[in-house]
Structures are given as structure tokens and as C-alpha cells.
Image (tube, grey):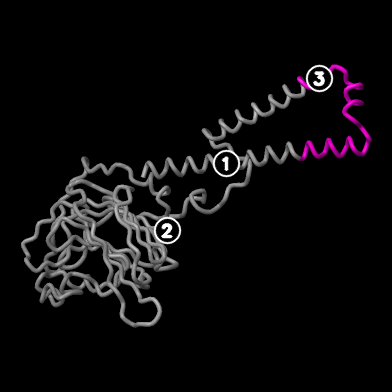
Amino acid sequence: MSQLLDSMKAAKGISSLSYYLIIFIGIMFLLALGVFIYMASRHITLESVRAAYPNLTSTRVLYALSACVILFIIFMLINSKYELYFQKRATIGIDRPAPMSLTFWKPGTSPNPEDPYKLTLTSSEFPMSSPEIYTVGVEIIVGDTRTNDKMGPYRHIIHRGTNELMNFTDPNSPGSAPKGMGDLADGLPRQMNPGVFLDKFTNDLIIFIDTDPIGKGSNSYRESIRIPDFPLKKGFHLHLVVHDRLIEVYINCKLVSTKLLNGTPKGVPNDWYGRIGFSRAAAIIQNLTLWDSSLYAIELRNKCPVIDMSKRKVAPTSCSTAGS
């Protein structure tokens, strides 16, 4: 990432140098053209100029031109270091104003701050304009990934979509069996975009996105990205950036995976859920941040402060109890 930022900065500096060089050449050309036209219109020759200004030698003229060139070079060097701009900045790309965001599920605000679960966020609290363009960030602390269930299911962390899992809090309730058969039996909602889960057995994150087919066809896809060996028992930042059919996954503001989806992200209910259902992850999630736009990598680089859990007592459990 640092090499990418350095190359972007270098390219930006070169482009600004080229801009000012073109401006300088243009100004010198216009000045020379103006002097030539003035002398031609007044029938002035070089001999008459020398006669009128006997002390104006060609050496002094060259000194003056050299001084102008040197001053321009110094200006370009200063510009390349401090990025001085006099042209109008573009309002797109990395120079755009910071997109608006809102943060939810802040530490200590849930009814059970030591083990927050059944977290919800309704569409009215943060409307999203498109299922295909958005950014979501969340802080996660996973306490344990071990499981004694040989059939799974996936362990729920967070998803946006339908709410079936809210009704299945008992491991023996309908929808939790038979396990390993997909959808609710695997601890997954019917619709999600996105969904973040722990793998059934391993120390991996699985990120799901339901998509619609492109062109003809009626079958939706459930596409996924696997992030192996994420930090355990240590807080980390997870950011997902979705733009059309491209999804980017960042851990601690560093790009770890990208995927070009086969379909377009599906429009699902714009309600968010954290650690719900009969198989929730032994994790803490907090500071859910949403943007109604896709962020650039350079815009994310400063959005991962240190997660300090030293003054907070947490005890994440791995599953719900009946009626919780």
C-alpha cells in the first residue's frame, strides 16, 4: 500500500510539473510573439534598439532569461515537495470531499455491553441509495473460533438483509436442523448483501454477497470471499467496499482481497444485524460505520485507529440460549 501511495504521489508531482512547464513555455511564447508584433508594427529593428539602449548588451539579456529559468525551476522543485496549486482542483477521485458517514453500535451502548448481541440497525436510521455502491466498516474482536459441532453451522457476525435468524435463538429451534443443508440450517439468512461470518470449522472469515444474474436468467448467486487467519483475540478493523460488481476487503485498512462478482449485488432489505441467531460468533463487534458511497483505498488509510480494549471488560459467548 505504501508503494502504491508513493507512486501516486510521484505521478501527481510529475503531472503538476508538466502543467507548470507548459504554462511557462506558453507565457514565454506569448511574450516573444507580442514583442515581435510590436517591433514589426513600429518598424523597429535590432540595430535601432541597440542604438537607443547602448548599455543593453546581449549578455545582460541572456542573464535575465537565465534568471527567469532558474526561478521557475526553483518554483517547480518547491511545488513537487509541498504541492502548491493555482489551478482549480478536481472534485473527483482522491481529491473529492470526504464522503458522509455515520457510526452505530458504539461501545457500552448495548443492553449487554460485556457481550453485545442481537444488535439491529433499521433502514430509516441510515438509508442507502444503492445495493451496488456502498462501504461498511466495523471493529471486531474474536475471542474463540473453536467449535464442537461437526456439522457447523457458520457463526454469525454481521449482515444486512432479511431477519429470519432473529427468530432462531435456540440451537434446537426450527431452522437450525438439519445442519449442513444450506441457508437457515447453516446459520445463514435467506438474503444478505453483505454477510460476515466465521467459517464452520476454521479460523477464517467468510464474506457473502447475494447477487442477481446479468442478462437473462432468474437464479440468484450466493458469492463469497474467504479471508484466512485473521487476528484472533485482538481487535481489528474490517472494511468492505462494493462498487458495481467489484468488492474489496480491507483488514486494518490494508487491502487483503478483491473479487469481481459474477452478478450484480442484490437489493435486500436495508436492515443490519449483529450477532444474532442460534449460532453467533464468540466475538465483539462495535463502531459499525456506513458510507453511502464506495471509498478509495487512500481514503481508508487513516480510518483504523488502535482498538483499545484494556479498560473494557468483555466476555463474548459463542451461541445464544433459548429465548435470548
The percent coordinates of residue 25 (x first, y second) are 69, 38
Work out which quarter of the rendered image holds the N terminus and state it: top left
Which amino acid lies under the numbered mark 2 shown in the image of this protein? Ser
Q: CA distance from mark 2 to mark 3?
A: 62 Å
Residue corresponding to mark 1: 16
**Which range of residues does the magenta coloring cover?**
30-59
Residue 3 can be seen in this image: yes
SS label for mark 1 = helix
Q: Is residue 39 magenta-colored?
A: yes
Whether residue 137 is situated above or below residue 260 in the rendered picture: above
Question: Residue at 31% of width from left, 80% of height from top?
Answer: 219
Pinpoint residue 247: horizontal percent, then vertical percent.
35, 61
> Which is nearer the N-term, disc 1 or disc 3?
1
* Tag 1: amino acid: Ser
Q: Residue beneath label 3, please?
A: 57
Residue bearing the label numbered 2: 294
Residue 64, position in %: x, y? 73, 24
Characterize the local packing of mark 1: few (<14), some (14-19) or many (20 or more) Cα atoms within 10 angstroms: some
Residue 274 in view: no
| Disc nearest the viewer among 1 and 3 | 3
Mark 1 vs mark 2, CA separation in Å: 27 Å
* Contact flag, marks 1 and 3 (Cβ < 8 Å): no
Q: Is residue 76 above or below residue 124?
A: above
Dividing the picture into quadrants, the one containing residue 320 is bottom left
Q: Furthest-front residue in view?
A: 47
Distance from label 1 to label 3 (Cα)? 36 Å
Secondary element under disc 2, as helix, strand or loop, is: loop
Residue 304 in the image: state x and y as whole percent.
Answer: 33, 45
